[in-house]
Image: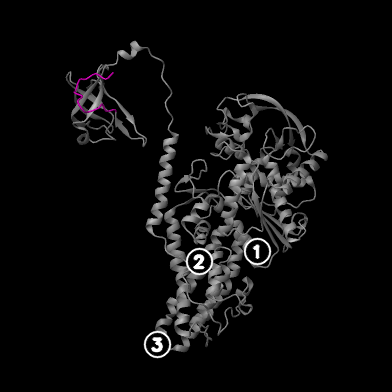
Amino acid sequence: MTENLKTPARYTITAALPYTNGPIHIGHLAGVYVPADIYARYQRLLGKDVAFVCGSDEHGVAISMKAKKEGVTPKDVIDKYHAIIKKSFEDFGISFDNYSRTSAEVHHETASGFFVKLYGQGDFIEETTAQLYDQEANQFLADRFVVGTCPKCGHEEAYGDQCENCGSTLNATDLINPKSTITGAVPTLKETKHWFLPLDRYEDFLKEWILEGHKKDWKPNVYGQCKSWIDDGLKPRAVTRDLDWGIPVPVKGGEGKVLYVWFDAPIGYISSTKEWAAREGKDWEPYWKDENTKLLHFIGKDNIVFHCIIFPSILKAHGDYILPDNVPANEFLNLEGNKLSTSKNWAVWLHEYLDEFPDMQDVLRYTLTANAPETKDNDFTWKDFQARNNNELVAIFGNFINRVVVLTHKYYNGQVPAPGQLSQVDQETLEALSGYPDLISSSIERYRFREASQELMNLARLGNKYLADEEPWKVIKQDEERVKTIMFVALQIATGLAVLSEPFLPFTADKLKQILAMGSSTTETSWAAIGTKDVLLPPDHQINKAELLFRKVEDQEIQAQLDKLEATKKTNEQMNKEVEPQKDTITFDDFSKLDMRVGTIIEAEKMPKAKKLLVLKVDTGLDTRTIVSGIAESFTPEEIVGKKVTVLVNLAPRALRGVESEGMILMTENADGKLVFINPDEDGVDNGFTIN
């Protein structure tokens, strides 16, 4: 069962369904949608029959959680974020043939049909098990409604289905010290009936299909995670849940239960294909049931098990569906050194990026591709974004195109000149150009999109080097005929860039084709044509005026983004600060024993060899006493001399580093987390006054 070696009749390309509990951020783009789009666009350029499908995942527990948090209905949540996500994808140039949603009728029918067929075939087992139950909320707790300590790594905020710290897949009942995210209560166990998919029945099939059939062609992270799961022994997985949001279980006894989202969501690829085919007047079945179709799932690493073990087992049980040829899952993208987080707003949101950097979709696409987390987690930084744009897209790609077009208009009024005799350098350059389609194709076909993007940039480098070496602006003074040949060769490279950049930089490719006037039938150039050494842009063809393909990104634009992230970080730090619980109750007599007086700091110096301590002399009105205070990291001695403070004067003396401290200065933290003095009103309040 190796990957389909003959040329497929068609390609079904899926991209992971995004949850509609928030917008799309750069982590989603880098992990799933940009590589999937590159692959789909590339196959279309080769003339292949492609169905590139996706849709909003609208039945996850995350939706219910978001709705409860915002005090709205789940439908309010999905309608809001489905619209934002769909528009963001369209504006960013993700070229789905169909973007659907799992709340659509066609999806409910398709998912229900799957369940009914497998149920009728006896592919499920029915079990009554003890599930976590929130007595205060009066409901069973689905996985994401439970948090607790991960039994595998000890992370204290693991969810009931997965630990996001170590990546382990869990059951809610596995958690140590679980608590409900709805009420915070400690859940109890209560019996409930559910249907399970017995994955252990598919162990032999999965071993043959994955461990023997895909050891060499699947990415190591995908193969390794699958092998670990299979080696650990597969166990039944519930396909239903006690929830009031989702697709109702369509068999007797399923009242009050819905299909578990991991069962329902991948079927969304099939229902999205059905929706597309109905609209386009096509038959959907060959895209899912013909062995000569290549099925590919583009996902993030947190979805490997669902797409490589669970969903294929469902398809195998159904009996008439093809299995994926490959599941090129990426690792995670971090942001400025920290893990992306929707809940903490630590992200670059796509819809906000499109507002703040209009007409710069390709810059983000290129940056995310050039730094894609294909084999390990990678980090997005705004400085790298700026450098990729200014030093590569502007200085290499854009610079070459601008020089070619400007010189063609300057010397030949925008007409492609007829070449003379080709020199050895000309021939070698055109030979190199003809090799790039195969170079880039080889990388894309192996899902090495980073490598492919750099090969594209190498073609732009080839053009820059050729112009710099041949110097047409100098040669024009001595040999006008030679310059015609130089510019002809340079224009062939520009044409090659216009075609080969389309999967990576679709907006730029369109703009470049307009500049080169490549819209007419006489100048239609295919991916394959670039590799034939034929003339790509013929003599006498009229090109249009130069336009800048890219603009520089200025330092202040980058600083604005960094400032926004810094503000987010401070907000998170403040929100994460826990208010200390109330201490044990005291009586009025206990409180009346505290003697707090107004005092003035009259001297202050740092304690030698102590990072945090200042030695203060304080006039309390009763006396002048020494107080050692741990405030040296917040204040210099000079800035606090003369400051009025509140002093607890009857605290028992205590020796600190050999200095006897005779009281305590009362402090607190402000909203920014900085230490501040608890100051008495300074007007008319003398030292020694008692604070009541």
Give yes or no for contact between labels 2 and 3 (Cβ–Cβ under 8 Å): no
Within 10 angstroms of label 2, few (less than 14), some, or many (20 or more) residues?
some
Per the rendering, the mark at residue 43 is 1
Label 1 and label 3: CA atoms lie apart by: 46 Å
Task: Say whether residue 561 is left or right of residue 23.
Answer: left
Residue drawn where x is 44% and y is 48% of the image: 336
Query: How far from the left and from the top, in percent, is residue 675?
Result: 31, 33
Which residue matches tag 3?
477
The front one of 522 and 605 is 522
Which residue matches tag 2?
457
Q: Say what amino acid the circle numbered 3 marks.
A: Lys
Query: How far from the left and from the top, in percent, is residue 108?
Result: 73, 45
The vertical placement of 546 against 561, above or below, is: below
Query: How far from the left and from the top, in percent, is residue 277?
Result: 74, 58
Task: Say whether residue 607 is left or right of residue 337.
Answer: left
Is residue 5 at least partly visible in the picture? no
Q: Magenta residues: mostly which secondary structure? A: loop
Label 1 and label 2: CA atoms lie apart by: 20 Å
Within 10 angstroms of label 3, few (less than 14), some, or many (20 or more) residues?
few
Residue drawn where x is 61% and y is 64% of the image: 442
The vertical placement of 159 against 517, above or below, is: above
The residue segment tinted magenta is: 678-692
Within 10 angstroms of label 1, few (less than 14), some, or many (20 or more) residues?
some
The front one of 178 and 92 is 92
Upstream in sequence: badge 1 or badge 2: 1
